[in-house]
Image (cartoon, rainbow, N blue to C red):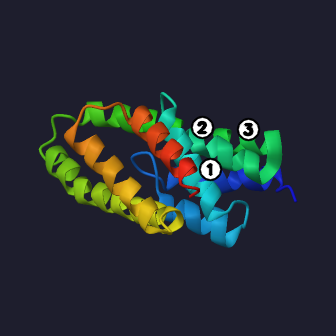
Amino acid sequence: MSADPWDILLTFTRLGLVSFGGANLPEIERVLVEQKGWITPQVLAGGFALGQLMPGPNMLAMTHYGFAAGGWWGALAATAGFYGPTALLSAAAMLAWQRLSRWRWLPPLRSALLPFGAGVLLAGALVLGRSSLHSWPAAVIAVAAFVLLQRTRVNAAVVVLGAAGLGALLGL
């Protein structure tokens, strides 16, 4: 079954407008997996991991999700919907931010947004963990990857590829 490209465009436009700092994985999971049924939790987690390997925006996974939902037209609609309106909105916000940069309330506002961003990131980590960690070996690989990324300067792509290779060897 292939989803309607127009529905994909509208859905990913809404998802792009409610995603801050790159991702709102809980909402993306709720809509694409639970509500629309276009992808599985495994496709969500796999696409996110693949997006981490690519240079540039890590949410290129949206193209992958759109392809899974509706083929090439779905990939195009998802990419245009997720990035187009938010790019325009971001440019307008940047211009407004520069014009208002001398206002006293701007630094407190920026500081007030930080806990919100941390909450969104934590919720995203929980979504990925719930859909990816189904065994002790998988949990050990995830913890080892986290420690490697926190304590060393190893390239994240090397860690992702190493974890994927180890997971494949273990049959995860």
Residue visible at 66% across and 41% down in the picture? 63
| Camera-side mark, 3 or 2 | 3
> In this picture, is 31 found above or below 48?
below
Which residue reaches farthest left?
104
Disc 2 is placed on an element classified as: helix
Question: What residue did someone put label 1 on?
Answer: 13
Nearest to the observer: residue 80 or residue 90:
80
Q: What's the residue type where badge 1 is placed?
A: Thr
* Callout 3 crowding tier (Cα within 10 Å): few <14, some 14–19, many ≥20: some
Picture coordinates of residue 91, whole percent (x, y): 44, 32
Question: What residue did someone put label 3 on?
Answer: 76
| Camera-side mark, 1 or 3 | 3
Q: What's the residue type where badge 3 is placed?
A: Leu
In the displayed structure image, the side of residue 149 where residue 38 appears, left or right? right
In three-dimensional space, the C-alpha distance between marks 1 and 2, rounded to whole angstroms, equals 8 Å
In three-dimensional space, the C-alpha distance between marks 3 and 2, rounded to whole angstroms, equals 11 Å
Picture coordinates of residue 124, whole percent (x, y): 42, 60
Q: What's the residue type where badge 2 is placed?
A: Gly
Could you tell which of marks 3 and 2 lies nearer the N-terminus? 3
Residue visible at 22% across and 48% down in the picture? 110
Picture coordinates of residue 74, whole percent (x, y): 77, 45
Disc 1 is placed on an element classified as: helix
1 and 2 marks in contact (CB < 8 Å): yes
Could you tell which of marks 1 and 3 lies nearer the N-terminus? 1
Question: What residue did someone put label 2 on?
Answer: 84
Residue 140's mark?
A: none
In the displayed structure image, the side of residue 119 where residue 161 appears, left or right? right
Which residue reaches farthest bottom?
34
Nearest to the observer: residue 141 or residue 122:
141
* Callout 1 crowding tier (Cα within 10 Å): few <14, some 14–19, many ≥20: many
